[in-house]
Image (tube, coloured by chain):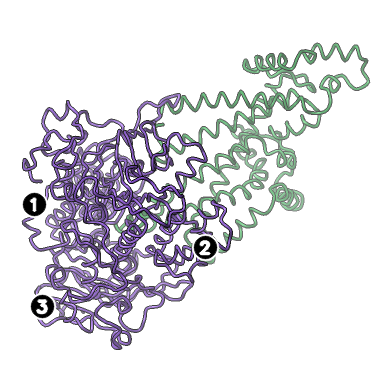
Amino acid sequence: MYGYLVRRLMQFAVVLFLGSIAVWAFVLLLPGDPATVLIGADASAAELAATRARMGLDEPFLAQYGVWLGHAVSGDLGLSYYSGEPVLTELMARIPATVQLAGFTLVLTLLIAVPVGIVVALRPYSAVGRLLQGYLTIGLAVPAFWFGLLLIIVLAVQLRWLPASSDFVPLWQDPGAALTSTILPAVAIAVHTSSVTARFLANSLGEVMGKDYIRTARAKGVPEREVIRRHAVRNAALPTVTVVGLQLGSFLGGTVVIEAVFNYPGIGRLLYTAIGERDYALVQGGVLFVVATFLLLNLLVDVAYGVLDPRIRLT
Amino acid sequence: MVRDDVAHSGTMPVRPALSVRNLVVEFATPAGVVRAVDGMSYEVYCGETLSVVGETGSGKSVSVLAALGLLQTANLRRVSGEVVLDGVDLLTLPQVELRRRLGRDVAMIFQDAISALNPVQRVGDQIAEGLRVHDRALTADAARERVVELLEMVGVPHPRARYDQYPHQFSGGMCQRVMIAMAIANRPKVLIADEPTTALDVSVQAQILDVLRLAREETGAGVVLITHDLGVVAETADRVAVTYGGRIVETGDVTSIFTRPRHPYTAALMRSLPRLDSTAERLLPIPGQPPDLSEIPPGCAFAPRCPTSRGREVCVQTRPELRADDAGNGASACHFPDEVAAPGAPPPSTESAEPSSGEAAGPSSGEAAVPDAEVPDAEVPDAEVPVLEVGDAVSRFPVRSGVFARASAWVHAVDGVSLRIPPGGTLGLVGESGCGKTTLARLVLRLVDASGGRILVEGDDVGRASRSGLRRIRRRAQMVFQDPNGSLNPRLTVGDNVAEPLRLQRLPRARRREEVRELFSRVGLREEHLDRFPAEFSGGQRQRVAIARALASRPRLLILDEPVSALDVSVQAQVLNLLADLQEESGMAYLFVSHDLSVVRQVADQVAVMYLGKIVESGPVARVYDDPRHPYTRSLLASVPVPDPVGRETRRRVPLGGDVPSPVDPPSGCRFRTRCPIAVARCAEEEPVLREVAGGHTACHFADESGRVSV
């Protein structure tokens, strides 16, 4: 287990390094010169050259990357071209909002997906089962942003129950306000993700129910409820954990469209704006954060596998 | 309500522990309603073993699963009849009530114990769950103590430490012991074992049968043993019920079933069995295929294959009922039970070919290779050049671990093996699972790269062959795999499957079709079936298709990796005879890999016994089977259940203890010494070499003292 973790962490470092090259190089491919963006298109050639020199843009690419990486490792992701604030500060300001939304969405997703998945797997032809299968189909088909707009129109604009655009209220300051400000975007996302998760869970649960060890448990005289709870669900959880991990990664990476729709001040909206403003330093820093989050979650998923399934331990 | 039918069978004046009456189980399938169990009745009394024996699809397993409400497939249409346990009909009980009795009054032991245990739960907890679910007052600590006792009883070493391990840390045999511990935990009145030893090696099978016997004595339960293995039946059963086509066709005590069968199916089944103790020149298979349950004929289900019926009207028209014989200790569902008793029935016709095995006496007497006109590859090999020569072959696999996944250890799957097969000869390669026999077979075609040694197919070095050279070698040496379901492409018709090698040789379409037709008739398949898909065939027919495909490139060597292990006994004999005929016709050489010693004795003229990657004994069949000099060979032979109940009490069987050690870290000196009954200090220090002993080769320090111990 220990060796496994060390090896995985080293892999993590290598992939992150390769990812940083991709993130950095990708900005070079974009049209437009950051210096022009910074000082305006009508600046003189001399001014432009001076700015480029100040930003290090006249150095060779490799040197630029070296400098950037050196700074990045020590936590200095540069200054936002637009606000002049350090990129790290900008990111840190938005991370709590995104983490809170992601957490809410994850909880909602699991709260819906687990019972729905179990019922759909075990009672597919009952009235409730059919109803829930309908929910899954709709949840899979309807895009989150469209559902989000619907929620805004009905609940915020017409009924005026909840605010249409959400400011970030930290949970630890005012749980009630935090809930009302986050609930709409969370629901909008969770309807889709819970459908995906429930479908996965239902599939693997259906498969597990046909396994020999389920028959063994029944033959021991274990009541059906406990057969499902103790023997089936844990085995069926494995493939589902992968999906949930990936989903959580995408929540944390910023649900760009949803944050834009709800005007929610998270990483997603930050990136969205930064791209529009060609704030390359901010884009680089933000994407690097997203990449790191994804990698870290992947690692967590693999560790969770080991915890859930004793066969995967050790190596 | 069912109390007064005591002494139903007349011999046991007590109420049966479990009685199944007129059980019918039906499934809805696309082909219509299938009646998998068609009015079965049997009962088992406390302390006795009833063996329900039959082939795949005869309804033997389905009957008990349905009886206990464990059949939960969506297409189950009907379960009717009575299953009486303790005066209560289980089929009428609601699920909650039924579950209260399962595991307490009646317990099951399943086939393939590794998958029957929950992979993510500790083994001990799984047994404890069975205790606590029926006794809610039992504390966790008390349950743990009881489980440790149970594990000890069934022979799991270090039960305290083993309690906290997971099923994947147990061997197959150990898992089966755990299953048995789980089953006897609540001292049930009835134990039902469904093919409990089928996936296990013979040495482990013998151990498990002993544990089952112990479990019966310990609990006094009535045991229902479901199996397809007549050897297991003869070794363990008191009474036998033979099933065919969803019905019981014969019942009786074990001795009369084996000595005086009164149903032609039972008799034919016995005749089709390859025997360890005799060399029949040719097996007598049951012709035809097992019945298709979706279209059972109105008469006797066995009539189309029956040697006694001879097409008599009554057999085809009227279904025979199970009738007790005059003595009252058996019953047969045959219109002519008395005609069966005389086993002089003529062997099935159409099979007049001379036997191909059996004449092997000397070490190199297999050269039956008649230069063959059919071989197109002009150069007929010199009889001096063996078809296969393996010299010191080694195959290692790394075991990776640590931070950098370095190979920290090596598994020596094959560790210095040499063999030689002359043209037309058959070498049987036997050994238990994990001994490296399949890896060796794959090395020959370079499906696995050898780590050392030399492999020559008709003089061509497989290891050094170029891409095209290897292709040419693979054309001359073909492989038939164990599982014909997995080895045939399900999306291609059987004809296209067989034509695949011909297509690779760029044969024109019309010629291909013609060749495939010819191949089909050679392996006994009907040409009309060319365009069907593999799923439409039974296991035996599919294996014929796989053999036809292997024959397509006219190989000189056929590597058969457990070719009949997945087949039923009656069909197995057909395939073995087919292989003998094909060899006779074409002079092909066979490398026949199997764990089944009886089958190998039937087909091979030379045998090699493998243990942990090495050959421990080899030689002509008669030498190895009748005068085994290696203690491993002797134990293996002694572990095989003999299909003859007469004298089973006096047969002393000392099963090999323990499991095969890990090939990562094999024992020093002689690899077998950890399980060897005659090992001494020298065996740990000095590795015995394979040397010539009594006309064969044996790797044991004590090979010369054949009478030293009789295992």
Note whether B379 is above or below A27 in the view shown: below
Is disc 2 surrounded by few (<14), some (14 to 19) or many (20+) residues within 10 Å? some
Q: How far apart, in angstroms, are the residues tagged by discs 2 and 3?
A: 55 Å
Instruction: Give the colour chain A carries in the figure.
Output: green
The image's mark for residue B493 is 2
Q: State left or right for residue B424 relative to residue A126.
A: left
- Looking at the rendered image, the disc whose residue lies closer to the viewer, 3 or 1, is 1
Amino acid on which the number 3 mark rests in the picture: Gly
Q: Who's the residue at 57% across and 63% down the image?
A: B510
Q: Earlier in the sequence, mark 2 or mark 1?
A: 2
Is disc 1 surrounded by few (<14), some (14 to 19) or many (20+) residues within 10 Å? few
Which residue is at the front of the view, A261 or B451?
A: B451
Q: Name the residue under label 3.
A: B10
Q: Position of residue B493 (x, y in %)?
A: 52, 63
Q: State left or right for residue A100 relative to residue B680.
A: right
In what element is the residue under mark 3?
A: loop
Which residue is at the front of the view, B123 or B1?
A: B123
Note whether A81 is above or below B224 in the view shown: above
Q: Where is residue B375 in the image (x, y as percent from the top left)?
A: 43, 54
Amino acid on which the number 2 mark rests in the picture: Thr
Chain under disc 1 = B
- The answer to whether residue B159 of the structure is visible from this angle is yes
Q: Name the residue under label 1.
A: B652
Q: How far apart, in angstroms, are the residues tagged by discs 3 and 1?
A: 33 Å
Chain under disc 2 = B
Instruction: Give the colour chain B carries in the figure.
Output: purple
Q: Position of residue B267 (x, y in %)?
A: 21, 72
